[in-house]
Image: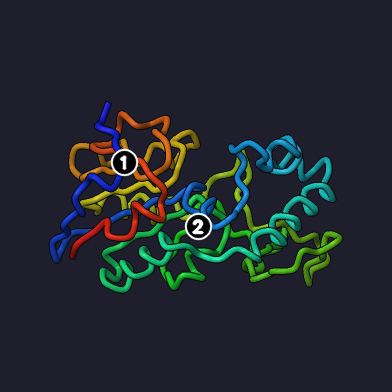
Amino acid sequence: MPRAAPSRIFAPLTLSSRERVFVLTGAGISAESGIRTFRDAGGLWEQYRFEEVASPEGWAAHPEVVWRFYGQRRAQAAGCAPNAAHAALAALERTLGDRLFLCTQNVDDLHEKAGSVRVCHMHGELFRSRCETCARQPFEDRVAHARIPRCECGARLRPHIVWFGEVPLAMGAIAKALEACDVFVTIGSSGAVYPAAGFVAAVRGRARTIYLGPEIPDNADAFDECRLGPATEAVPGLFTV
């Protein structure tokens, strides 16, 4: 088990001018901005079974329920603002440029609101929709539609979300970034959802691996360090360049 202690007792991570950093963010970073999560008491899973609202089978059986669920998520997330952790990662991107690969399991747009421009949304994006049939590219859609809208081709639109049983997005780019990174940091992810939970194992032994979050993750043994604490306290000042 790696050492686990409040993040304030750890020194900043010093980066050389050539080191590449892979940052994976999970629900914990957005929860501090008020985004409702699935795992917490009072979270979204208490109102819905994931099979109903986050699977291709649920979409096939009850598309209206699924669309209403994501409409509620859009309405709730629209009023949330990025926090100090999002801002710190945006500032890090401005310093490192393409030496930072920011990958998120979150579907909200708080990283972008904070100023990050190179965000890999492996689980899709809440404020985008796509056609379930044609090759039309996913497009921005911030409306909490009361009914399922239609594509220009006549088919139904669906949320641009990776559901359970579907392959996450940009796995090729993610694999290349993992292979190239010198430092791997997970922020606020439970370590329970794969394939993201396995990223740290892929780099262990050749990259520094650090976890930041409010509680020890399920995959804690794969990290060199677990720095416990709120992301808003742990991420600002994490790196010196």
Closer to us: 113 or 4? 4
Query: Which badge, 2 or 1, is on the more N-terminal residue?
Result: 1
- What amino acid type should be assigned to the residue bearing mark 2? His
Drawn side of residue 97 relative to residue 42, left or right: left
Q: In terms of depth relative to the viewer, which is nearer, 123 or 6?
A: 6
Q: Which mark is residue 121?
A: 2
Quadrant location, the N terminus: top left
Residue 77 numbered tag: none
Cα distance in 3D space between marks 2 and 1 = 28 Å
Mark drawn on residue 6: 1
Q: Position of residue 162 (x, y in %)?
A: 60, 49
Q: Amino acid at mark 1?
A: Pro
Kindly identify the residue that appears in the image at 38 percent across and 59 percent down: 102
Q: Residue at x 55, y 64 (%)?
A: 109
In the rendered image, residue 83, in percent from the top left (x then y), is placed at 47, 62
What crowding class fits label 2: few (fewer than 14 Cα within 10 Å), some (14-19), or many (20 or more)?
Answer: many
* Residue closer to the observer: 219 or 227: 227
Residue visible at 63% across and 66% down in the picture: 138
